[in-house]
Amino acid sequence: MTAPQAAVDVPALLDALYDSYDGFDVSQTTVSVGAEEFAAFADRGDVVEVRVRVEGSEGLLGVPGDGRVPAGGDDGSREVATDGADGDGPLPRAERWQDGGNDTDGDWRTPGGIVDGRNSLASAAEVLVHDQTGVDCRVEDLLRVSLVSVQCEETGDEVWELTALFAGRPEMGAPRRGAAWCEQLAEPLSPF
């Protein structure tokens, strides 16, 4: 059994997002489960996830949908033919990475992940994008928020998940191995 995450004040995070951004969509879902199933969620604690839809001139910045992203430090020097020539062309495209052996089955998603919620969600999202892709981005807007409450039927206890999808633009850097510019991305808003 894993230790629960430190308590996250989901209502305070949502209030901070309302204070910082105008006009974003919010969806909320409540799911009731039995005590045994709830125990798995309670062990994990409240969860805050951020994702950034980074759109540049080459398309949408993506990472493999299976969640396997190389750790920082990979400089992306693997030569990949992006323009049908010798690999010196523009930034890598997702379909070229797939052909080159990146095992993703074409399932690309927006970069991001779970954060502790202690800092600005936008700042945490920018750091995750850089760590996962090698691209520095600037978060410009909040597109939508998903709230999921999992409640225990027997006790009434609940665990929350807040997932925020931001819009951003690339500022500098090129996708390193394991990240690519894509034409479209899967953007799930909740892993529940």
Image (cartoon, grey):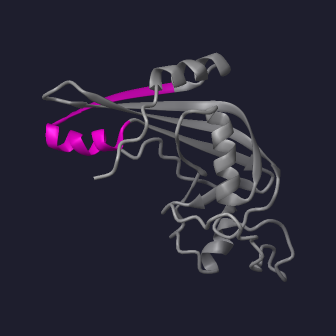
Q: Report whether 125 appears left or right of 170.
A: left
Q: Report whether 2 appears left or right of 15.
A: left
Residue drawn 52% across the image and 30% down it: 145
Q: Is residue 98 above or below residue 127?
A: below
Q: In this view, does 102 lie above or below 151?
A: below
Residue drawn 59% across the image and 24% down it: 24
Residue drawn 35% across the image and 47% down it: 3
Front-lying residue, 62 or 158:
158
Question: Where is residue 79 shown, x and y percent of the image?
Answer: 77, 80
Residue at the farthest bottom position: 86
Front-lying residue, 149 or 141:
149
Total labels: the figure holds: 0
Question: Where is residue 163 shown, x and y percent of the image?
Answer: 49, 36
Residue 144: image quadrant is top right
Residue 66 counted in the magenta span: no
Q: What stretch is highlighted in magenta?
A: 26-45
Residue 41 counted in the magenta span: yes
